[in-house]
Amino acid sequence: MSEQHAFAVLRALSDGRFHSGEAIAQQLGVSRTLVWQAVHTIENDFGLAVYSVRGQGYKLAEGFEWLDVTAIRAGLAPAAAEALTVAVAERIDSTNSQLMQHATSSDLHGLVLAAELQTAGRGRLGRRWQMRLGSGLTFSLLWRFDKGLAGLAGLSLAVGVALARALRVLGAPVTLKWPNDVLLDGRKLAGILIELSGEAMGPAAVVIGIGLNLQLPGEVDQPVAALDQAGVRVGRNALLAALLNELQQVLDAFAKQGFAAVREEWLALSAHRDSPVRLSFSHGEPIEGIARGVADDGALEVETAAGMQRFHVGEVSLRALS
Ligand code: BTN
């Protein structure tokens, strides 16, 4: 059973109503057995519940809103609509990997790629990023800056501010955990993976990848949150447009003023300000202290027994002490 058939059957079922196996088979020009197999793939591989009722056919437990370029663009503010080109992929290895290829092989700027399903989604620190089909957003944005890699310090924090702005307007009281997690009730709602290509002083291309949970995924190795837990009911296309509107604004401000443009806002959103924290490194002993803030270059400022120390994006994790 190919996933392609499963996607086609899922599209036929996405209105959340009953459809007979025969009608779907006719519509798609395939056998009823193939439709039945596709329903199994939808349940077992995609993790979606399908009711099967004799005499009525198949029905998704919940309707499914597909990502749709026209619907996303309809929600964009004029400045974002001008700056961004939006594309949607049904199934792709990783939106970040795809846009990283464009980063080096083209001069495209403002390209957004969202995916229904990533087969090799990547998280920070070499982790995998998995999301059940339709239960969240996975997308990346390719952006170019004139200032060179050195001028991009704090970019991941600025991206967090953009996401928080959009999510707070929708009613989710999110906070930010350094360097770049978006939290809801202290649990991870969204993650950001930023990848860079360019030179220290020359122009730089940046791929900003974002994964955000709308409904809780299955088993995961860390405490996670989903937007519906905050009572936010928003369609995936409208949500993506809202996030892109804020990202475009923040990235424009960042291009002009760097992280300083949103530093105060980041501090106000910080989940750990003036709290005891422990920073763990991939090598070496963890450090404990009180998180005091962030510098203009996005470095975390921690008051330790040895005095105020600064830590840069990338190698550290942050944990509140119990
Ligand atoms: C994290 O570890 O917190 C970052 C997760 C980033 C996941 C997103 S999903 C869209 C984009 N494509 C990827 O392969 N990863 C990012």
Image (cartoon, rainbow, N blue to C red):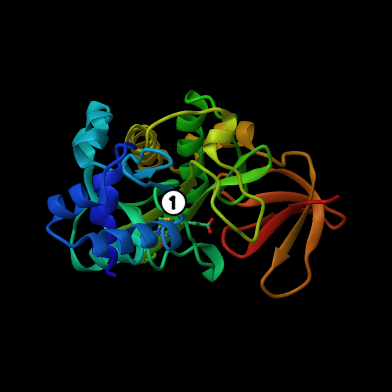
Residue type of the residue flagged with mark 1:
Leu
Residue occupying the point 36% across, 51% down: 139
Residue occupying the point 60% across, 29% down: 173
Residue pointed to by mark 1: 48
Residue 112 in view of the camera: no
* Element at label 1: loop
Residue occupying the point 30% across, 42% down: 14
- Ligand 1 closer than 8 Å to the CB at disc 1? no
Q: Residues within 10 Å of mark 1 (few under 14, many from 20)?
A: many
Disc tally is 1
Relative height, residue 319 to residue 258 (above, below): below
Q: Position of residue 249 (x, y in %)?
A: 36, 34
Q: Going by the image, does 38 lie left or right of 136?
A: left
The outermost residue toward the front is: 55
Q: Position of residue 23 (x, y in %)?
A: 19, 47
Quadrant of the rendered image holding ligand 1: bottom left
Relative height, residue 170 to residue 250 (above, below): above
Residue occupying the point 65% across, 57% down: 222
Q: Going by the image, does 170 lie left or right of 314?
A: left
Quadrant of the rendered image containing residue 196 = bottom left
